[in-house]
Image (cartoon, rainbow, N blue to C red):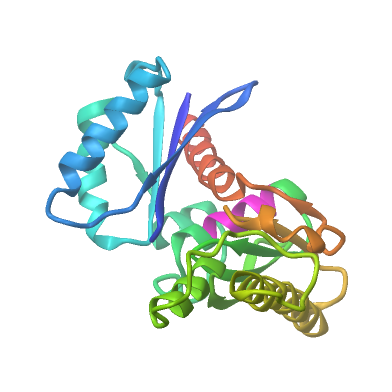
């Protein structure tokens, strides 16, 4: 069993992959970087192991990606303590070993590279990966295994939080796409403006990218909020919610296979 760990700005996502079966468990733990972070994650992970009746001994390999530098050493230490495994750490040195071309590798998030690598392995075609996460990202990767570029916009939740945090009378807004763009109350108006606005952002950026690289590039969606944007169903070749974790798994398997041969 392979354990993948993707540390993002909003959540730490941990996925258990069983060969021949697929993803057996996926955990989402809210990200924190406060002084009690080590204790917090230690308790959360051990509690989830108990709840799901999983044993650390089942894990035969661990791969770690993080866009939160302060949590890297905390997780390396925790993973060693709990699972007795030194994680494979995703970063520029690993990209080179994989033979995966990433221009300016120190400037791109490891999660975006994982998305691109998964798309390259799964589809074996030219792909645009649209990730609806904390940020809305568009990562373009060629079938030859090269990241061509990235576009980044604020994520849906980020946009909603920015609007509501600066306006005292705005309520908490549910992430539900309304049928109409004509808001009839405050909640409906914000949903219409932001969510339908993001439908437009996604369509326009995909169109612009295709103008530059070719209309044959397949748009693929991932990320925790991809399910909200159902009007984009016809735009995407596929919605793959585990794409980032798949990329981490493929990286681990590729390196593990190289070490065996």
- Can residue 19 be seen here? The reply is yes
Measured as percent of width and height from the top left, residue 238 is found at 78, 52
Q: Quadrant of residue 28?
A: top left
- Can residue 7 be seen here? The reply is no
**Tag count:** 0
> Which one is in front, 40 or 66?
40
Residue extending farthest left = 35
- Horizontal side of 81 relative to 217 (left or right) equals left
Measured as percent of width and height from the top left, residue 116 is found at 61, 59
> Which one is in front, 228 or 25?
228
- Horizontal side of 163 relative to 51 (left or right) equals right
**Within the magenta stretch, is there residue 117?**
yes
- For residue 148, above or below residue 220: below
Q: Quadrant of residue 80?
A: top left
**Within the magenta stretch, is there residue 19?**
no
Per the picture, the main secondary structure of the magenta-coloured stretch is: helix
Give the residue drawn at x 82%, y 84%: 211
- For residue 23, above or below residue 38: above
Find the magenta span and give its range: 113-121
- For residue 164, above or below residue 243: below
> Which one is in front, 230 or 107?
230
- For residue 211, above or below residue 56: below
> Which one is in front, 116 or 24?
24
Measured as percent of width and height from the top left, residue 67 is found at 37, 61
Give the residue drawn at x 61%, y 62%: 131
Q: Quadrant of residue 216?
A: bottom right
Measured as percent of width and height from the top left, residue 152 is found at 55, 77
């Amino acid at each position: 069993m392979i354990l993948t760990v993707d540390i993002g700005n909003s959540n730490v996502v941990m996925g258990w992959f069983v060969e021949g079966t697929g993803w057996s468990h996926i955990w989402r733990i809210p990200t924190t970087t406060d002084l009690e972070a080590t204790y917090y994650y230690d308790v959360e992970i051990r509690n989830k192991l108990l709840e799901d009746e999983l044993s650390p001994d089942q894990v035969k390999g661990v791969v770690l990606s993080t866009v939160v530098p302060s949590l890297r050493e905390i997780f390396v230490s925790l993973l060693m303590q709990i699972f007795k495994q030194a994680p494979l750490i995703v970063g520029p040195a690993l990209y080179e070993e994989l033979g995966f071309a990433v221009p300016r590798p120190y400037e791109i998030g490891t999660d975006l590279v994982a998305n691109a690598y998964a798309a390259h392995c799964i589809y074996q075609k030219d792909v645009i990966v649209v990730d609806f996460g904390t940020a809305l990202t568009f990562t373009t990767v060629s079938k030859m295994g090269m990241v061509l570029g990235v576009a980044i916009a604020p994520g849906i939740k980020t946009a909603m939080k920015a609007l509501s945090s600066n306006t005292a009378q705005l309520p908490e807004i549910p992430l539900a796409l309304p049928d109409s763009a004509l808001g009839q109350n405050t909640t409906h108006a914000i949903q219409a403006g932001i969510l339908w606005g993001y439908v437009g952002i996604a369509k326009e950026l995909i169109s612009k990218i295709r103008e530059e690289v070719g209309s044959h590039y397949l748009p693929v969606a991932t990320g925790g909020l991809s399910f909200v944007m159902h009007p984009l169903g016809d735009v995407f070749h596929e919605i793959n919610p585990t794409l980032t974790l798949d990329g981490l798994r493929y990286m681990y398997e590729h390196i593990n296979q190289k070490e065996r041969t």
